[in-house]
Image: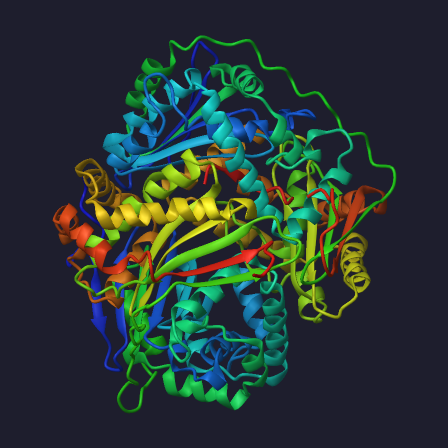
């Protein structure tokens, strides 16, 4: 095995005087450069009345800047093949891009223009708002979207950031003002809560100098705003919601409960357990039972959304309406099994070998390295994380997995959301 | 950039190797020259279903074992089926790549097609189709394609008609497998961290003894020229109106291919070339300016891909609520007439060249994508295009683009579909796709 691309020696990490943290990985093997930026801000700051503000304000930033109209910005991206995207989630705002090495300066000029100097031009923002409202209407017809939205509403109480999607609701998005968007940008776009990762055929010091020229003047006033996602209250009952949609053939469903934060000490035990339960190979145990043996679903898998807050730990599946009860029985029996018996030694070693052995695959491309670095930085894992990782994974025991499953998996207190051809009982 | 090394085994198996020694990773593919274009009514969807059965066991690798072996060796694997091919791959740490050869050599010949496994997979495949049926655009796309092709098998989507999926038998599946899964109908592609001579030696050891099969039947159906515009009007429950126009277009080896590639890109930007394929956003391209900037539509797309037989160029749009679909159609046709009437600009041509160059660089980051592009090019044209693609593209002139616009954007060459939402229950017996690749997962 050659050395890992991410080690303390292989990465240059600096924090500029304005608080912006930069990580650079020099990779001479491809003529492109990948950028991943992340700010610790987002929809968590929206109130019930301003739901969707972070998302709308962020999306509006490319609609006009001090140096570029929306049309000029688009022409510049298209004529160079560069990409630049920016969007707000609940916990973080991400921006990303890609370009040829030869266009890196140009990309930085464009990115800093958007991040520092958006102008929120009325005509363009209104056009965009109308597009978003139309997208909402289309999403109302999308079984997967409706299922997920209602699942979150069941799982997290009103007032909790995860009760809604970060893009808000039509009622609130209609009313958000330009002043609110400008204010959001002024208040929350700050270098001291931002990380920029750059991976590509660039020498680190030269890249950092260029970034400093482009973003060094970005200043923050005062202390950064508090960033906190509360825990969901413990569940006390089964909640089931059916969302009937006309003209559909298949029901999309989610069944689950609140999971854990990324920094929870149970994270690795739960992660390995969930891999065995519903992801490894063709959807783990769930796939072997509900798809392969019972033949009930093309897709059935589980996922732990462990980030700055405790997202759902849930099972997702698409099934024919006549098979809902059987599919749920199959899923619930797998949840019960995970809670009642330790996984087998064979299952555990397979999961461990996969997690440690496949590391190189994800780090083969600039995008893969950039994504990993960005996650390492967000969760404070340290640049030696990948060197420690195999040890951490091999240290997970069957007992730890069982204990984590017993602590977090629920068979009497779950939320269940279904959307599709249902009679709406 | 290293060259692609071609070898041909005595049993007719073609081998394409490209060492890329930048990361300790390798990818191994087998491409079979069979897809939904080799299907006739009654067995539509059979190629895709056969692909699913290839994960269901052989005498030496029982069901599920492939997956466990891949997991234990830190790899990923999958497969997908399209109109023109069925492809299988494993990407692994390079010191483990022998495993891929073992798996693929075994299932080229020994897949079991256990009747019980066929039965449980039937409902899985129907479930895959039903997932697509939840999308209004799937229904419209499927019907437009069916109208655009009267006799050629591009008439049906790779997933197949549901009635065929309900009726097909184990023996039909097995027969299809035995007919097309022969070394003389397959191409091996490997890219990554290996020595080419050693890899070829291993391939010969594993695959060389597999006997050549009878030559699979040639697909000889030729779509008769379209004589008049065709129209599909679909009324079903849905959130908004959708537009879909399909124009018969040249195949990947036609001299018009590259001018059409440029034409599509001037309309909507250069598409992505990798497996997952995010292309240029195309927000300065003509269709975006004519449909989105003017607030007629919320989405517009022009898709043109390399196919073995003449495929279609598809222009799709999502109407803004309240905008009559007729207006969307007029705006799109006006753009197509404009590009046929007047040459594109130098700047537009340069933009396409640059975007294509950049997309190619993006798409070749990572050996899996390299393997994908090599194999896909070989099936529809030749792997040699990997080295010449950009140079061939850059020979296209503004006059070429105008010529193909005039030739293919004729009213008589198009099939136009409108999706008009209704309220209430869906009509019975409505048929239902965009030509998505179909994979095991």
Quarter location, residue A25: bottom left
Is the residue A46 above or below the residue B347 in the image?
below
Left or right of residue A189, residue A144 in this image: right
Is the residue A308 above or below the residue A304 in the image?
below
Is the residue A96 above or below the residue A405 in the image?
below
Foreground of the two, B355 or B64? B64
Residue A253: percent from left, percent from top: 48, 54
View extreme (right): residue: B228
Q: How is the image coloured?
A: rainbow
- The quarter of the picture where the C terminus of chain B appears is top left
Foreground of the two, B360 or A405? A405
Residue B73: percent from left, percent from top: 25, 34
Foreground of the two, B284 or A160? A160
The residue that appears at 21% across and 71% down in the rendered structure is A14
Residue B252: percent from left, percent from top: 63, 34
Is residue A168 something that shows in the picture? Answer: yes
Q: What count of labels does the image hold?
A: 0
The residue that appears at 57% across and 55% down in the rendered structure is A420
Residue A73: percent from left, percent from top: 54, 71
Left or right of residue A212, residue B438 in this image: right
The residue that appears at 74% across and 38% down in the rendered structure is B146
Is the residue A63 above or below the residue A365 in the image?
below
Is residue B276 something that shows in the picture? Answer: no
- The quarter of the picture where the N terminus of chain B appears is top left
Quarter location, residue B343: bottom right
Quarter location, residue B143: top right
């Amino acid at each position: 095995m050659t050395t890992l691309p991410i080690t303390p020696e292989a990465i240059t990490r600096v924090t500029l005087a304005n608080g912006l943290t930069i990580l650079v990985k020099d990779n001479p093997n491809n003529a492109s450069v990948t950028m991943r930026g992340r700010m610790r801000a987002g929809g968590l700051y929206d109130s019930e009345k301003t739901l969707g503000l972070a998302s709308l304000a962020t999306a509006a930033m490319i609609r006009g800047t001090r140096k570029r109209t929306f049309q000029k910005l688009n022409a510049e991206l298209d004529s160079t093949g560069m990409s630049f995207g920016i969007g707000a989630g609940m916990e973080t705002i991400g921006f990303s891009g890609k370009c040829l090495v030869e266009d890196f300066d140009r990309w930085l000029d464009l990115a800093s223009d958007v991040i520092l100097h958006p102008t929120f031009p009325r005509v363009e923002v209104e056009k965009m708002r109308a597009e978003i409202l139309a997208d909402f209407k289309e999403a109302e017809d999308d079984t997967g979207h409706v299922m997920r939205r209602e699942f979150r509403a069941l799982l997290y109480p009103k007032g909790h950031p995860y009760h809604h999607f970060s893009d808000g609701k039509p009622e609130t998005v209609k009313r958000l003002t330009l002043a609110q968007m400008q204010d959001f940008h002024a208040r929350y776009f700050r270098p001291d809560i931002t990380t920029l990762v750059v991976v590509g055929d660039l020498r680190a010091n030269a890249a950092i100098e260029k970034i400093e020229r482009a973003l060094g003047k970005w200043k923050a006033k005062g202390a950064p705003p508090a960033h906190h996602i509360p825990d969901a209250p413990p569940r006390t009952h089964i909640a089931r919601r059916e969302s009937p949609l006309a003209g559909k053939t298949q029901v999309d469903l989610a069944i689950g409960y609140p999971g854990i934060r990324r920094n929870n000490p149970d994270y690795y035990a739960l992660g390995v357990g969930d891999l065995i339960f519903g992801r490894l190979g063709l959807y783990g145990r769930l796939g072997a039972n509900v798809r392969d043996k019972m033949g009930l679903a093309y897709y059935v898998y589980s996922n732990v959304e462990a980030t700055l807050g405790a997202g759902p730990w849930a099972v997702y599946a698409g099934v024919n309406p006549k098979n809902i009860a059987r599919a749920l029985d199959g899923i619930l029996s797998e949840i019960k099994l995970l809670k009642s018996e330790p996984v087998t030694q064979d299952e555990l070693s397979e999961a461990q070998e996969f997690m440690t052995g496949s590391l190189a695959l994800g780090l083969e491309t600039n995008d893969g390295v950039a994504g990993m670095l960005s996650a390492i930085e967000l969760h404070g894992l340290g640049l030696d994380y990948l060197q420690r990782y195999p040890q951490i994974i091999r240290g997970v025991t069957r007992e730890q997995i069982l204990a984590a499953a017993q602590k977090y998996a629920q068979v009497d207190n779950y939320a269940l959301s279904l959307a599709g051809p249902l009679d709406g009982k | 950039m290293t060259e692609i090394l071609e070898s041909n085994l005595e049993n007719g198996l073609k081998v394409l190797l490209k060492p890329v020694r930048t990361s300790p990773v390798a990818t191994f593919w087998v491409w079979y020259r069979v897809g939904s274009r080799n299907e006739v009514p009654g067995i539509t969807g059979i190629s895709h279903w056969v692909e699913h059965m290839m994960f269901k066991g052989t005498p030496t690798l029982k069901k599920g074992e492939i997956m466990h072996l891949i997991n234990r060796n830190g790899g990923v694997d999958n497969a997908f089926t399209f109109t023109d091919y069925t492809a299988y791959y494993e990407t692994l740490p390079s010191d483990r790549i022998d495993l891929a050869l073992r798996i693929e050599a075994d299932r080229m010949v020994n897949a079991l097609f256990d009747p019980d496994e066929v039965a449980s997979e039937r409902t899985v495949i129907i479930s895959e189709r039903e997932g697509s049926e939840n999308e209004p655009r799937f229904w419209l796309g499927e019907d437009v394609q069916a109208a655009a092709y009267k006799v050629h098998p591009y008439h049906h989507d790779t997933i197949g008609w549901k009635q065929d999926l309900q009726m097909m038998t184990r023996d039909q599946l097995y027969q299809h497998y035995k007919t097309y899964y022969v070394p003389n109908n397959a191409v091996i592609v490997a890219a990554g961290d290996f020595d080419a001579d050693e890899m070829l030696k291993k391939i010969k050891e594993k695959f060389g003894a597999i006997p050549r099969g009878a030559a699979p039947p040639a697909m000889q159906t030729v779509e008769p020229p379209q004589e008049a515009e065709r129209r599909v009007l679909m009324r079903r429950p849905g959130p908004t109106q959708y537009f879909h126009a399909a124009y018969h277009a040249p195949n990947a080896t036609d001299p018009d291919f590259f001018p059409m590639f440029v034409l599509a890109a001037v309309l909507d930007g250069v598409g992505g070339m990798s497996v997952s394929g995010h292309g240029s956003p195309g927000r300065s391209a003509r269709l975006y300016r004519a449909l989105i900037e003017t607030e007629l539509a919320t989405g517009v797309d022009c898709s043109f891909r390399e196919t073995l037989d003449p495929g279609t160029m598809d222009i799709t749009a999502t109407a803004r609520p309240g905008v009559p679909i007729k207006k969307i159609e007029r705006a799109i046709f006006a753009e197509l007439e404009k590009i046929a009437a007047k040459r594109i600009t130098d700047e537009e041509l340069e933009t396409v060249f640059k975007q294509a160059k950049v997309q190619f660089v993006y798409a070749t980051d990572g050996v899996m994508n390299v393997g994908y592009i090599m194999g896909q090019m070989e099936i529809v044209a030749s792997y040699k295009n990997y080295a010449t693609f950009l140079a061939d593209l850059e020979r296209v002139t503004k006059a070429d683009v105008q010529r193909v616009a005039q030739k293919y954007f004729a009213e008589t060459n198009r099939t136009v579909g409108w999706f008009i939402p209704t309220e209430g229950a869906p009509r019975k017996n409505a048929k239902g796709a965009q030509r998505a690749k179909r994979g095991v997962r």
